[in-house]
Amino acid sequence: MVAQTAARARCRALVADALDLTGKFGRESFDLVVSSECIEHTPDPREAVRQMTQVLRPGGYLVLSTPNIAWWPIVKTASLLKLRPFDGLENFSSFRGLRNVMNTSGVTVLQEKGLHLFPFQLGLHRLSRWADDNLQPLRSLMINLCILGVKDARSSGVTE
């Protein structure tokens, strides 16, 4: 998937442990970090976000999406009832928690967006897209959280 993404986007794509990005790449190494449905599969999503902010250069962008903690009870119930086969880490987040980590790491949140107000699209893609575009006041109830942030120009990405 990484190779396909690199070819399609005509960019260099790298794979690393989300909890040790600074160990592999050092601080302030990237102008852009994209994390799509990744951090929830780590033992510490907040640390994964901190690592992403630390490898960003000042003025660099972080684009992040992850499942909404509001949906965790439903997902957990579906798993227990064997309605969805999944066996792994699922540590969902909230806008507030992600915003706090980003802000304390020297990243300013530029935009928050929710995706998918209801599960199981069931052929209702047009309605789902309409909801995504027009019902953002309900974003904290949507299944996926999306955040765009920029690292402050004066920030070194180091937090005490």
Image: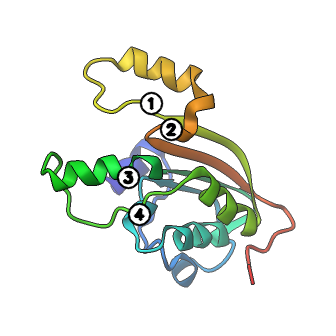
Crowd around label 2: few <14 · some 14–19 · many ≥20 (10 Å): some
Q: Amino acid at mark 4?
A: Asn
Please name the residue that numbered disc 3 is placed on: 72
Please name the residue that numbered disc 2 is placed on: 141
Sooner in the amino-acid sequence: mark 2 or mark 3: 3
Picture disc at residue 91: 4
* Residues at discs 3 and 1 in contact (Cβ within 8 Å): no
* Residues at discs 4 and 3 in contact (Cβ within 8 Å): no
What is the CA distance from the residue labelled 1 to the residue labelled 2? 7 Å
Sooner in the amino-acid sequence: mark 4 or mark 3: 3
Asked if residue 26 lies left or right of residue 16, the reply is right
Percent of width and height locating residue 140:
56, 41
Q: Residue at x 28, y 54 (%)?
A: 76
Q: Residue at x 58, y 79 (%)?
A: 22
Say which element carries label 3: helix
Sooner in the amino-acid sequence: mark 4 or mark 2: 4
Residue in the foreground of this view, choosing between 157 and 123: 123
Percent of width and height locating residue 1:
31, 53
Q: Amino acid at mark 1?
A: Leu
Q: Amino acid at mark 2?
A: Leu
Picture disc at residue 117: 1
* Residues at discs 1 and 2 in contact (Cβ within 8 Å): yes
Q: Residue furthest right?
A: 154
What is the CA distance from the residue labelled 4 to the residue labelled 1? 20 Å
Sooner in the amino-acid sequence: mark 1 or mark 2: 1
Crowd around label 4: few <14 · some 14–19 · many ≥20 (10 Å): some
